[in-house]
Image (cartoon, rainbow, N blue to C red):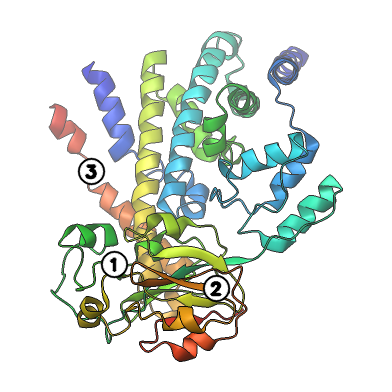
Amino acid sequence: MTDVIISAAITVAGLGLASAVLLVLADIFMGVKINPVEGKIRDCLPGANCGACGFSGCDAYAKALAENAETPANLCRPGGKETTESICSILGVEAEAAEPITAFVHCGGDCSKQVDKAIYQGLRSCAAAKMLYGGKGSCLYGCLGCGDCAAVCTNDAICIVNGVAKVNPEKCAGCGLCVAKCPNHLISLVPKAEKAVITCSNHEKGAVVRKECQNGCIGCMKCQKNCPAEAIKVENFLASVDYEKCIGCGKCVEDCPVGCLEMLKA
Amino acid sequence: MKELLIILMSAVLVDNYVLNKFLGICPFLGVSKKSDQAVGMGVSVIFVMLVATAATWPIYTYLLAPNGLAYLQTIVFILVIASLVQFVEIFLKKFIPALHRSLGVYLPLITTNCAVLGVTINNITDEYTFIESMVSSLGCGLGFLLAMWLFAGVRERLEESDAPECFKGIPITLIAASILSVAFMGFGGIIDKLFA
């Protein structure tokens, strides 16, 4: 009887000891030492792995922050101010907040304004729609409305309203995934502040634009002439706003004869 | 060769661990909300099953059985599998960090999942040779992956569906799981006919 107990106990204890030795040896020879600072920073980051910081994912950014003191702590767009502050408190440096930004779709040619040239019934993808004669709308520069940007958004910030993608600035983290996705390059990152933004990307001449879309910029130069801060420039029949100069007075929005400028809400 | 093929096919389809033997239900219900996670879990289970079988079969055959300690198999298997998974995790972290990142979350979860333990013990009960045991583990893992993947697809649809209020969430999920299980019972007998 005692034999059975002893042999069983020895076997289990021996196997347990062997496993323990194996694990201890493995930890000594193959253990990966993670810099504790890096681990803490990694926990602060949102883990979206969007790449907006310029590093390949959150792990790489945390590593860069921990190892190189010159890496700016305010690069994480999805995390925003809170993340920057917590990173700075770990690193023990002064927080320097990044200007909040949001994605904006530079097209306002929705179903009521843009003239359709065809009915598109294919794959619900902007990239596919674009390949077929540049999409269903007559404007070759406008929003294709199939929602490739909405599909790629991790924050659910984009929805298609009346055939045109709209970004909800409150939800937008400014990661820029949609900017890269839009086949017509309609989306750009703009400051989340009270600034004028153009809702058209059409570079054609005024008369052509008029036939395609009621919202299109006709390049009349009125905004450029009247802007008190000289923040708007019309090039190739399309106005563009310099957000650094724009004071958010709203004069251009009132003046625009087609209504293709609007104020962004802060 | 034909023997091995029969073992593999019957482990995947007929004796599916989740849908026929009802082992490993916890991850089956827990991690099947999204198909990418379900596939990650399935791949991890295959991996752990293979490693576990490769370790436990020799231990049983050359250590426990000759010394009349066969009754210790459950506790010894748990011990060996748990420490082995820990070891593999350390190994992956050092040498294949990319794989560790994708499997890492699931590995500790399934250290001694009942499906993993079930495979190793069933291999012994069925008196398989080492090669047969490995093939059977691979088949069981593939069957688990298949069940997880199929069920994740079903659940993604269920999320969108308009189920009656009292069935929403877990109840409708369990009903779907049982229907899937009944569907897999339809595979019974297919192996005999295929290889007859």
Q: Position of residue B10 (x, y in %)?
A: 28, 33
Q: Amino acid at mark 1?
A: Tyr
Q: Amino acid at mark 3?
A: Phe
Query: Circle 1 — which element?
Result: loop
| Tag 1 and tag 3, C-beta contact below 8 Å | no
Q: Which residue is mark 3?
A: B187
Specify the quadrant of the image occupied by residue A68: top right
Marking on residue A141: 1
The answer for which chain carries disc 2 is A
Q: Position of residue B60 (x, y in %)?
A: 54, 16
Which badge, 1 or 2, is on the more N-terminal residue? 1
Specify the quadrant of the image occupied by residue A126: bottom left
Specify the quadrant of the image occupied by residue A199: bottom left
Q: Is residue A205 visible?
A: yes
Q: Position of residue A9 (x, y in %)?
A: 75, 18
Q: Are marks 1 and 2 on the same chain?
A: yes
Does residue A29 appear left or right of residue A185 in this picture?
right
The residues bearing labels 3 and 2 have C-alpha atoms spaced at a distance of: 71 Å
Does residue B101 appear left or right of residue B141 in this picture?
right
Q: Which residue is mark 2?
A: A231
Residue B137 against residue A99 in the figure, above or below: above
Position of the C terminus of chain A, as image quadrant, is bottom right
Q: Amino acid at mark 2?
A: Ala
Does residue B171 appear left or right of residue A85 in this picture?
left
The residues bearing labels 1 and 2 have C-alpha atoms spaced at a distance of: 23 Å
Q: Which residue is found at the position 49% from the left and 75% from the top?
A: A197
The answer for which chain carries disc 3 is B
